[in-house]
Amino acid sequence: MNFPGFILNNTGLVYEYTLNHIALVVTVLVLSLLLWTAVGLVISRYDRMAEAVIGLGNVVFCIPSISLFGLFMTVPGLGLGRRTATLVLVLYAMMPLVRSVYMGVKSVDPAVIDAGKGMGMTGLQVLFKIQVPMAWPMVFAGIRVAVVLITGIATMATFIGEKNLGRLIHQGITRGNADMIFAGAVIVSIIALLLDHIMGRIQRKIISPGLRFQAGEQ
């Protein structure tokens, strides 16, 4: 087995697929954060809605990715390629992101919330000045899970025409070429680990040591 040699002999192709993979993952992550963070904050105010939304996220998460890609590929206006891949991956990011935001906000000590209300804070002020900052450790845990999840599932988008690292894995299986399979798998793993490391560095920068200690982090 000589997958490093395969990478060196196909640098242009591997570079193209790697950039496409990273671009897809970053796009999905940004859209998912904007959408699902907002949804998580909204449902934190309405418990009945929260049950339905989190339940929906769990259902979507249980659907095989290849089935979901195939289903949305048939929707007019989506079809093969980046649009369908982006939509499906955003849906898969729903469960870890919505759940982490909701659980993070709801886990704040009620005594702290009561203290804020006693100081004359409104409901929105309590949410954004107390609950959201204290929920950050749990929210970031969800983000890091979503990053690794998106990076892995993005490989399946090759079946709907996305030219990313999943194509190396798929073609390697089709051709019985172990070097292609390992090249794709190793690079995907490196991307996931790198993005997780970056999120961890950001997490340590913006979360106070006290909150990290409460969350059981070093």
Image (cartoon, helix red, strand yellow):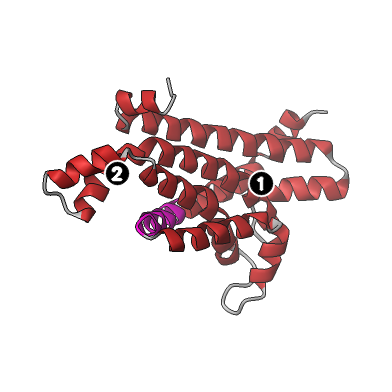
- Expressed as whole percent of the image width and height from the top left, the position of residue 183 reads 72, 36
Count neighbours of disc 2 (C-alpha within 10 A) and say few if under 14, some if 14 to 19, many if 20 or more: many
Per the image, the residue denoted by label 2 is 131
Quarter of the image where the C terminus is located: top left
Query: Is 43 within the magenta?
Result: yes
The kind of residue tagged 2 is Gln
In the image, is residue 186 above or below residue 29?
Answer: above
- Expressed as whole percent of the image width and height from the top left, the position of residue 130 reads 25, 42
Query: Is 72 within the magenta?
Result: no
> Looking at the image, which residue is at 79% across and 36% down?
179
Q: Residue furthest left?
A: 120
Per the image, the residue denoted by label 1 is 165
Quarter of the image where the N terminus is located: top right
> Looking at the image, which residue is at 41% across and 47% down?
101
Residue extent of the magenta highlight: 29-45
Count neighbours of disc 1 (C-alpha within 10 A) and say few if under 14, some if 14 to 19, many if 20 or more: many
Taken as a whole, is the magenta stretch helix, strand or loop?
helix
Which quadrant of the figure has residue 49? Answer: bottom left
